[in-house]
Image: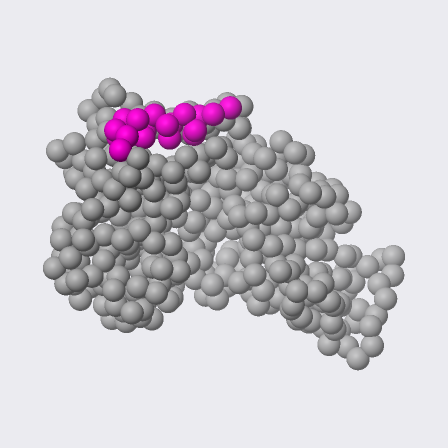
Amino acid sequence: MKKKINMWLPALLLAVLSSGCQRNVSSLSEEPQTPDSDMVSLTVWGAAEDEELLRQITEDFQAKYRGQAEFQITYEAQSESSCTNVLMADLEQGADVFAFADDQLNTLVAAGALEPVENAASVKESNLPEAVLAASVKDTLYALPLTADNGYFLYYNKEYFTEEDITSLDRMLDIAAEHGKKVSMEWSSGWYVYSLFGNTGLTVGLNDDGITNYCTWNSTDGTIKGTDVAQAMTNLAAHPGFISTDDVGFLEGVKNGSIIAGVNGVWNAVEVEGAWGNDFGAAKLPSYACAGQQVQMASFSGYKLIGVNAYSKQREWAVKLAEWITSEENQKLRFLMRGQGPSNTRAAASEEVQNSPAIAALLEQSEFSCLQRIGGNFWDPVVVFTTEILEGNPSGNSLQEHLDTMVEGITAP
């Protein structure tokens, strides 16, 4: 489903908002106006949840440049996670300005969809170093950082856990089980499963070809072997205080009281805090028992970026709009309206952001996180592996065999 907003600025600023399954256009003016050859027409893609935010941002943009041009700015809802696939289907007819997840950057650059950012020095100075790195390929900046919050951490209900309790996942599971409750984590996504392998010395990542993966999660060498992690996961899965569930199940459990802690992201902070009230807590991920030691859980970190289509017919204005969307002022507005953590250093240092428990937890976890740079073959083999673990190994294969099969799939050409 796409939503479209057309905003015209002939002499007066007019805002238009329409939504639905059809690509309909509506205007606040009584009669439609026909753009002339001097009209600056731009299409913006952003998350469906950002509709009201982007409406306000684009209205302010038109007000800022009133008198310099007449604008027709069209907003279309487009998932940041699948933006690249849609754009690649028809690059020349794609959005002029678009939001996307940083793990799609290499593909967009390789396809020629993005050109190097012209004012790179200014962007680098005003944004967090990790966000700049996420927007770069081989030290060349190709997109503008928008957020620095696409990661995960621990939510917990203070009614049940102390600050000491939340340092150990095993302790938390015991407490949950004692109360007939659950601690949740999603194992149907390799994005979260990485947290159990990430700090063990076992590695996974993208090869130099930018397509295939390397992975040592099945290693039989080292202080912690692949089977050590697999056995730890088997123990966690069998614990009565553990549940694997997705975002929907997590929020349902939080609201009905069955889930009292869970690994999740900042996008659910408002609803979790609304459910737990004064007992709302957030912190870095805990450690877990593995190979006779406590291993700090790792995480993938992610960033949302704004790209300017290299094929834009109004590239100069598209660049100006992209810079406006990612400005300090509008990143602060994004935090206030959507709760998303800024990549802009001054916005991130603001009192409002610093006082957010979820953002603070994400920053605390950042010490144990790394950029997600994974090829497409990573995801499905991990789900097959975790399904076996969660179901109690119905195939009867050894843990090493399961690991070998998973790694073979992950590293497949």
Q: Is residue 85 left or right of residue 271?
A: right
| Front residue (pair 278, 80) | 80
Q: Residue furthest front?
A: 395
Q: Which residues are magenta?
A: 396-413
Q: Is residue 64 visible?
A: no
Percent x, y of residue 284: 27, 49
Magenta segment includes 246: no
Percent x, y of residue 259: 26, 61
What is the tally of numbered marks visible in this picture?
0
Q: Quadrant of residue 299?
A: top left
Magenta segment includes 400: yes
| Front residue (pair 173, 137) | 173
State the quadrant of the N terminus.
bottom right
Q: Is residue 112 left or right of residue 218?
A: right
Residue shown at 69% from the left, 43% from the top: 89
Q: Is residue 270 left or right of residue 397?
A: right
